[in-house]
Amino acid sequence: MNLRMISTAIALALSAMLLGAGVYESVVVAPNLQGAPSSLEHARGYYHATNPGMFFRVLSPGTQIFLLLALVCNWVPVPLTRWRLAAALALAILGDVVTFKFHYPRNAILFSGPLTWPAADLDRVAREWALGNYLRIAVILTAMVLVMVSVIRIARDTAPGEQRYSSSSSAR
Amino acid sequence: MKTEISHSTQYAMLPDASGRTEEYRGTRHTSDLGRERSWKGTLRLASSFLPLLLLSMLFGASSFQLAVDAPNWTGVPALEHYRAFYPVINPGTFFQTLLPAALLALLAALVCNWRPIPATRWRLVGALADMILVGVLTFTFHFPRNKILFGDPLTRPEAYYHQVVTEWVAGDYVRLAMILTAVALVAVSMIRIARDTAPRELPDSNTSGAR
């Protein structure tokens, strides 16, 4: 293990966590936002101590920092890995741009503004939120696959002598 | 270059695509052997990729539940809101799909990587056993507490529910640690498999000069 591998492996773990939490939100939380305003009243009443934003505001920058670290550590050795990690970092940042530009205004309507809008409009906003979350998941999944391929490439590139082009036949 | 193996050289020791030697007992072309090895290598690597993806997602979703959901289970009104908020789909629906999928993917990875490297085999067996224990823990520890918190009538004193939530959270830390162990075991296995299935020539690499 070396810094190249460790930094990329941590970036991989964090981006996979981000993906898992994003999918959880899409599968479990988003369908239950339908049925406004009572569904939103229950959501507000329930998320009184912590809310999903607190989780993502820690995990998302953490992922980006480790992606940046992985990029720095792998800048020189393999150009292809460099560009894969750079693309993964760009996608992780894009995911946050989507969050800030698309989801935050809808979060404000769904979870903090007065629930005076017509129910149909609130349900439409919840549907848009869910659709935007699919886009965010696709962006994170692409970033994760790029990091995964980078890990494989770095693993092969940094293999110790006895594991390189290994002697697995001896174990058969 | 294709090389026909004659009957006279049928049992010769030929170098294979990864530079090792093994007894050759057929009449297939060496290029066919290379293609077969490449195909098997890809399958081995892909089979380790999928459980890593699913287990990491499970870890992320479980972390989300522990960090976001559990702190909100304070007091009977919050539990009532929680029950009312999840009438269609609840977290159980998600985990009851993802956990069996991860177990199946792990089993497939184990089958695909049973023979080549003993250390990888046992790491994957360890990860599979670990995840089965996660299932056992969920059924025996979390399900009874889920029933108290999210199914039964909320007629007990508030302190009782606080105690149940505290136990649930403690159990979830154990579950998270177990999932993280499985993620680490599969990640190390994938790295080992990646090295084992590496092509002889890695294009676009200048590591020797860069280090």
Image: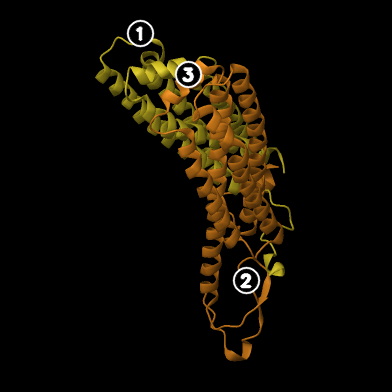
Q: To which residue does mark 3 refer? A: A46
From where the camera sits, is residue A157 visible? no
Chain rendered yellow: A
**Image point (57%, 46%), residue name:** B52
Whichever of labels 1 and 3 marks the residue nearer the N terminus, that label is 3
**Residue B41: quadrant of the picture:** bottom right
Q: Position of residue B16 (x, y in %)?
A: 62, 71
Q: Position of residue B141 (x, y in %)?
A: 62, 38
Is B78 rendered above or below residue B43?
Answer: above
Is B133 rendered above or below residue A16?
Answer: below
Calculate the distance from the C-alpha at mark 2 to the C-alpha at mark 1: 70 Å
Is B15 rendered above or below residue B176?
Answer: below
Q: To which residue does mark 1 refer? A: A114
Q: Secondary structure at mark 2?
A: loop
Q: To which residue does mark 2 refer? A: B16
Residues under numbered marks 3 and 2 in contact, where contact means CB atoms less than 8 Å apart: no
Calculate the distance from the C-alpha at mark 3 to the C-alpha at mark 2: 62 Å
From where the camera sits, is residue B26 visible? yes
**Image point (55%, 32%), residue name:** B146
Calculate the distance from the C-alpha at mark 1 to the C-alpha at mark 3: 17 Å
Q: Secondary structure at mark 3?
A: helix
Residues under numbered marks 2 and 1 in contact, where contact means CB atoms less than 8 Å apart: no
Q: Amino acid at mark 2?
A: Asp
Q: Mark 3, chain letter?
A: A
Q: Nearer the viewer, mark 3 or mark 2?
A: 3
Q: Classify residue A8 as left or right of residue A45.
A: right
Q: Position of residue B150 (x, y in %)?
A: 50, 29
Q: Classify residue B130 as left or right of residue B109.
A: right
Mark 2 residue crowding within 10 angstroms, few (<14) / some (14–19) / many (20+):
some
